[in-house]
Image (cartoon, helix red, strand yellow):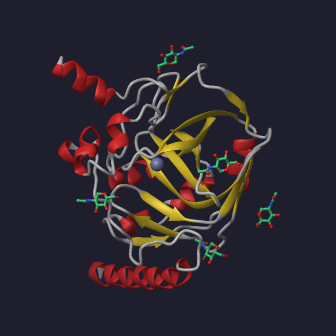
Amino acid sequence: MVQLYNILVLGLSLAYTALAVCNYGTTHFPREPNVPIGTFGYTGLDGPLNWYSLNKSANMLCAEGHFQSPINLNSSIPTAPGNRGLTLNITSYSEGAELENLGTTLEVPANGTFTTADNTYNLAQFHFHTPSEHRIELEYYPMEAHFVFQAANKSMAVVAFVIGIGPADPLLTSVFENAAEAATPGEATLTGPLMFKDLEDHFGSSNVFEYSGSLTTPPCSENVHWYVSAKPLAIDQDTYTKVKGIMKFNSRYTQNTPGGINLLQNSANAINS
Ligand SMILES: *[C@@H]1O[C@H](CO)[C@@H](O)[C@H](O)[C@H]1NC(C)=O
Ligand SMILES: *[C@@H]1O[C@H](CO)[C@@H](O)[C@H](O)[C@H]1NC(C)=O
Ligand SMILES: *[C@@H]1O[C@H](CO)[C@@H](O)[C@H](O)[C@H]1NC(C)=O
Ligand SMILES: *[C@@H]1O[C@H](CO)[C@@H](O)[C@H](O)[C@H]1NC(C)=O
Ligand SMILES: *[C@@H]1O[C@H](CO)[C@@H](O)[C@H](O)[C@H]1NC(C)=O
Ligand SMILES: [Zn+2]
């Protein structure tokens, strides 16, 4: 019985992946034909302390960049109300969207726009980290969501939300509704219905930290415009436990304040002096 169920679910998720792939080739963000599994990790020699060594030409900024993410957010980082000059507009998926297990994160390809004073960015995907990558006043949160955008001129922006445990924002419960069916890297499943109006309102009613940083994964590219909501979202305990059991731990350590020496370079200097 259990086996039959698993075979049915696997069949469904493979069929869904194949359907989704037909659309992907036409997007502004071409994706791999199958769910690609990350080649880096978060533990030992695969982990963030060694990302540079995994590919020294590609990942140099991981060890040498001076504007790396994530960081600790406090009053040294400027904030502005999320409804002043910023517009988040994410396409709703009333029939659900594809949740992909990349090994390094759980990710949902989706469309939408993010408009700032000087650019319009297109959404590529959103994904999650546990525990949070950013800290607010030194405090970490159980999870964090990253909505990754790219403008026509390739400029990147990430809209981020730290996530606490509490009465859940329904969007998060729905994103992970079938996550157990994508518990293994390379698998994909369907989310529940995804409606983003509440998220857009949440962002609009929060203060938003703005700073220039980097991707928090290799190749740690810089000039990424970060917009982190100061007001956390919430996920319920059961969904959190389920998601943590799948993602395990996928959070880069806190980087130096923007403009400061890369912490890895600092260590190398100290060891060699
Ligand atoms: C390292 O990164 C470069 C540039 O992205 C790529 O061309 C090369 O194949 C990578 N090398 C390895 C060993 O992954
Ligand atoms: C903010 O945090 C950084 C460390 O992340 C610290 O250097 C700085 O002094 C803090 N600013 C304030 C105003 O506390
Ligand atoms: C959001 O984007 C959609 C699709 O591009 C558009 O039809 C809609 O008017 C936009 N909504 C707002 C509030 O700008
Ligand atoms: C995003 O929009 C493009 C163009 O309309 C479409 O082909 C693609 O399927 C959409 N992707 C998702 C994940 O909805
Ligand atoms: C993209 O355009 C924005 C706004 O004009 C500009 O600030 C940014 O430097 C450009 N980015 C790139 C990578 O050209
Ligand atoms: Zn991320």
The reply to whether residue 176 is in sight is: yes
> Residue 206, how many percent across, how many down?
71, 35
**Which residue occupies 75% across, 42% down?**
204
> Residue 62, how many percent across, how many down?
35, 40
> Residue 164, how many percent across, how many down?
52, 38
Q: Answer left or right for 149 relative to 11.
A: right
Q: Answer left or right for 225 relative to 260.
A: right
Compared with 196, 262 (above or below) is above
**Which residue occupies 73% across, 39% down?**
82
Quarter of the image that includes the N terminus:
bottom left
Compared with 168, 179 (above or below) is below
Quadrant in the picture for residue 12: bottom left
Quarter of the image that includes the C terminus:
top left
Q: Answer left or right for 121 relative to 139.
A: right
The reply to whether residue 195 is in sight is: no
> Residue 165, how many percent across, how many down?
51, 39
| Depth order, front residue of 16/80 | 80
**Which residue occupies 51% across, 72% down?**
30
**Which residue occupies 61% across, 19% down?**
75
- Tag count: 0
